Image (spheres, rainbow, N blue to C red):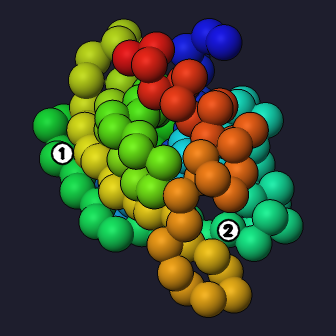
Amino acid sequence: MNLYPGYVRTPHYHETDQMGIIHHSNYIRWFEEARVALLDYLHLPYQQLEVAGIIVPVLAVSCQYKQMIRYGDSIRIAIFVENYTGTRLDFRYEIYNTKEQLLTTGTSEHCFLNRGTGRLIQLKKTQPEMHQIFATYAKLH
């Protein structure tokens, strides 16, 4: 298994403010897009988690803006599994421009819940194949 190369996107005009700078609220959406892309890369798309009766809510999110991103810039969001316990999955994000300058950093914290009961689940017990994928990928960092 290889490290995910990152999620690449070009900001849309509607994501800007009056100054042509990306509005701060969009970064959290971009983190989610990067998470979805990483799960697809790992062959664990959200649909597969949902079919298995698992939801992965956000417990906390943070974002540190280091440089502005403007309309027309191309960016790459590097995403790393910062922590995986079987019940928790935490990510770290780094947004770079095409010159590989670090523009933004962030984190998000998640847990695995049973969709029907809302109770915390341990993937190692309930979904051992999913657990193995997350555990293996987390060790790459």
Point out the tag, 2 or 1, that comes first from the N-terminus: 2
Q: Label 1 is placed on what type of residue?
A: Tyr
Disc number for residue 74 = none
Q: Position of residue 93 (x, y in %)?
A: 35, 37
In which quadrant will I find the C terminus? top left
Distance between the alpha carbons at the discs numbered 2 and 1:
32 Å
- Mark 2 against mark 1, which lies toward the viewer? 2
Find the residue positioned furthest to the front. 125
Q: Position of residue 27 (x, y in %)?
A: 38, 54
| SS class, disc 2 | strand
Q: Which residue is mark 2?
A: 54
Q: Is residue 24 visible?
A: no
The residue closer to the viewer here, 131 or 12, is 131
| SS class, disc 1 | strand
Left or right of residue 86: residue 45: right
Q: Which residue is mark 1?
A: 65
Residue plotted at (42% across, 34% down): 81
Quarter holding residue 139: top left
Residue plotted at (74% across, 38% down): 129
Residue plotted at (19% across, 36% down): 67
